[in-house]
Image (spheres, rainbow, N blue to C red):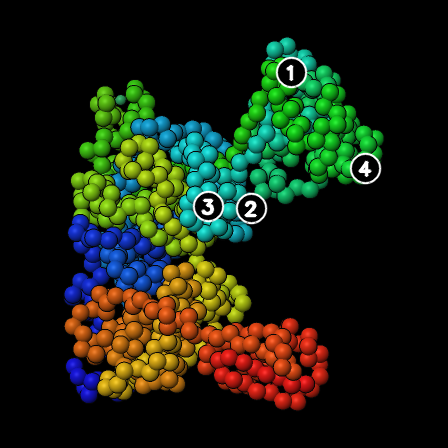
Amino acid sequence: MTMMEMSERYDPATVEAKWQRLWRERRTNSVDLRGAARPYYTLMMFPYPSAEGLHVGHAFAFPGVDIHGRFRRLQGYDVFEPIGFDAFGIHSENYALKVGTNPKQLIPRTIENFRRQLSRLGLMVDWEHVVDTTSPDYYRWTQWIFLQLHKHGLAVRKKAAVNWCPQCQTVLANEQVIDGYCERHPDVRVEQRLAEQWFFTITKYAERLLQNLDWIDWSETTKMAQRNWIGRSDGASIEFPLAAIPGRKLCVFTTRPDTLFGATYMVLAPEHEWVEELATAEQRPVVAAYRDRVAAMDLVSRRAVKEKTGVFTGAYAVNPATGAPIPIWIADYVLAEYGTGAIMAVPAHDQRDFEFAQVFQLPIVRVIAAEGETADTPLPAAYDGPGRLVNSGQFDGLDAGAAKHAVTAWLATRGAGAARVEYRLHDWCISRQRYWGPPIPIIHCDGCGIVPVPESDLPVVLPDIDDFRPDASGVAPLARVRSFYEVRCPQCGRMARRETDVSDTFLDSAWYFLRYPSTDRHDVVMDPELTRKWLPVDTYIGGNEHAVLHLMYTRFITMALHDIGLILFEEPFKKFRAHGLIIKDGAKMSKSRGNVVNPDQYLDQHGADVFRMYMMFLGPYEEGGDFRDEGISGIRRFLDGVWRLVRELDAAAPAPQALRRATHRAIKKVGEDLEHLRYNTAIAALMTLLNDIRRLGPPDRSTIETLLVLLTPLAPHICEELWETLGHTTTICAARWPSFDPALLVEDTVVMAVQVNGKVRGRIEVARDTPETDVIAAALADEAVKAYIDGKPIRRQVVVPGRLVSLVI
Ligand SMILES: [Zn+2]
Ligand SMILES: [Zn+2]
């Protein structure tokens, strides 16, 4: 096509359909995974394909990753940018239940719709390496990974109090419980149930998951969320001998061993296994009644309760520091799940203990005194600040911080305690009593016990069933399918029973990035050569709402597979950046608010390039922005301007020096901005460049080509079209990111001396072509100059361009 034939008006629909077709036909975005010289793996969080289709959050997240990937490609990398579908799990299943269709029929349709919408966004996705977690080709490896973890003692079955959502009718991982409520049902309180479940022992990796945060290049906010979730606390375990039972000791964990002398009573969780035995005959009835009352409460209510309740067991323990007998109580404010389910209560220095002691008139003994306080200063409330020890025998006068170690060391020498670290992180409960997931590959045999399904028998295929509804009994739907669960034991050959739980959907997504390069291999989970070449992932970008779920699990699975010897790296992503959220008119988008934006409508009306740029212009990518309709026409005008510019190009003359400077400024600025995901300011810099071309032009061919290359990560379709118009026969993706000439940047500003009544009083730095009035304004704004003028009127002003401002007062 010659320039004359090029259409007058920029029509995004035509341009975008053309290039999306050509990219497919020419395999523009397919990477030669084996032959690539400079591999760069950029990853976006693969979507769960909801029936509603793509939402605006995707239209913000994915282009943001794509822009980065395209930028890297222009820098000369072989960029692999795959996508897939996280299609197992409760979301999909619940929707299938709602519309009365089997997810096996429904999911392929929603995936197809998602593919169509995704391809409209103009992503540089390699469609030849897609994963679909519900495909047996994929989940056989999910099951295989389960077996490897099981083989290495990291997948265990145990009876545990688990979170049960009565609405989901399944157990939830701790991470799926938000302040006691179901993550999917913010108004449904999670209950506790005691059940046999499969767990991954992620707690074995707590310290490593924590330590590595010190060196991995991740968003600070994400690292902070992970640190809090792992929740390391340093303290001591201390043993309190029972007064009535010689040789038996109650063990507690405390982060405040320095306050041990102030422990005046102990509290056990009502469900602590020793309670029955400890309770004296006299107290037994009230203890039993109290336990029944608490058992009827869910965890949330227990955490929320303000009023302190409890009962005395009648038993005493001995404070190992003071030797005094102290009463043992049970109370709902101590939870069985944390530490040992028992605490030493130090009412003087812990507010909950303080309130409890006040209600039940238990002694309150101060053992820390702040500056200016003594052992006898009254305590209106618990004091948990710094200070020195008092009422603490040989430790009196010691700083509380130092006393933590001193008291612990002293206990250790007497065999009554030891330094200890506790974590808030729990093991990952991965079994779900639902249908829509990969069956856990285990067989239960009466003779042999738990028997893993032989690897050669994988996948354990999820059967087609009509009745896949979960029910309140907590029995998995597959447990109703005899043809599924009746199986011969692979070890002894007798009839046995298949595990009927399926695995948590977070397991599917904990390893998908390991699979992308190897999707052509059906015989191994990962092609060793491709894995060495492409992994770990260079840059992963996604939402911070996944900070403690998905992102913690990916790290754990990667570490586990590393230790098992399958991969050489222990952290999955060299770099992780959290992007922000798009809100609408100041509020989170939600169906109930009726402010959900459907990207299709905008893509129809404006095209992908305008929409991508508009989304990126809403705010800094890592912070997000507020979606407003106004402003989208500004982006359209900008692209119209670029379109016209190429049409009007008259390549005869070289660009003027001022324009060359402006162009090199833009190369530097846009490059730095794209590097750091500052897409909004990159767009602003491109708009400035277009204005500069109009103002300082005429542009030459090289200026226009530079503009197109800088713009192509953001608006790939129009840039391909204009690139072709300029006579190029290869994709603009194969162009090189231009380098800038530093010499053209440094001369950009000048330092000018400012004289007041003939004497130099200050210096100002201004852009070289700053108009005279602005130069004088800058001079008058200079603090040093201001001091000399002292508010007096200026009688005369002279500007010697590039050198001097002279003011006479
Ligand atoms: Zn729920
Ligand atoms: Zn057997």
Q: Which residue is mark 2?
A: 179
Q: At x 30% / y 77%, what residue is drawn? A: 703
Q: Position of residue 294 (x, y in %)?
A: 62, 34
In 3D space, how far apart are the residues under numbered discs 3 and 4 (Cα atoms)? 43 Å
Q: At x 31% / y 63%, what residue is drawn? A: 71
For mark 4, give the secondary structure.
loop
Q: Is residue 558 above or below residue 772?
A: above
For mark 2, give the secondary structure.
loop
* Residue depth check, mark 2 versus mark 1: number of the one nearer the observer: 1
Q: Is residue 465 above or below residue 65?
A: above
First reached walking from the N terminus: tag 2 or tag 1? 2
In the rendering, which numbered label is found on residue 241?
1
First reached walking from the N terminus: tag 3 or tag 4? 4
Residue 117 can be seen, yes or no = no
Nearest the camera: 293 or 807? 807
Residue reaching furthest bottom? 795
First reached walking from the N terminus: tag 2 or tag 3? 2
Mark 4: give few (<14), some (14-19) or many (20+) Cα within 10 Å. few
Does the beta carbon at disc 1 come under 8 Å from ligand 1?
A: no
In 3D space, how far apart are the residues under numbered discs 2 and 1 (Cα atoms)? 35 Å
- Under mark 1, the amino acid is Pro
Q: Which residue is mark 4?
A: 372
Mark 1: give few (<14), some (14-19) or many (20+) Cα within 10 Å. many
| Residue 302 appears left or right of 597 | right
Q: Quadrant of ligand 2?
A: top left
Q: At x 16% / y 65%, what residue is drawn? A: 26
Q: At x 63% / y 89%, what residue is drawn? A: 796
Q: Is residue 441 above or below residue 749?
A: above
- Under mark 2, the amino acid is Asp
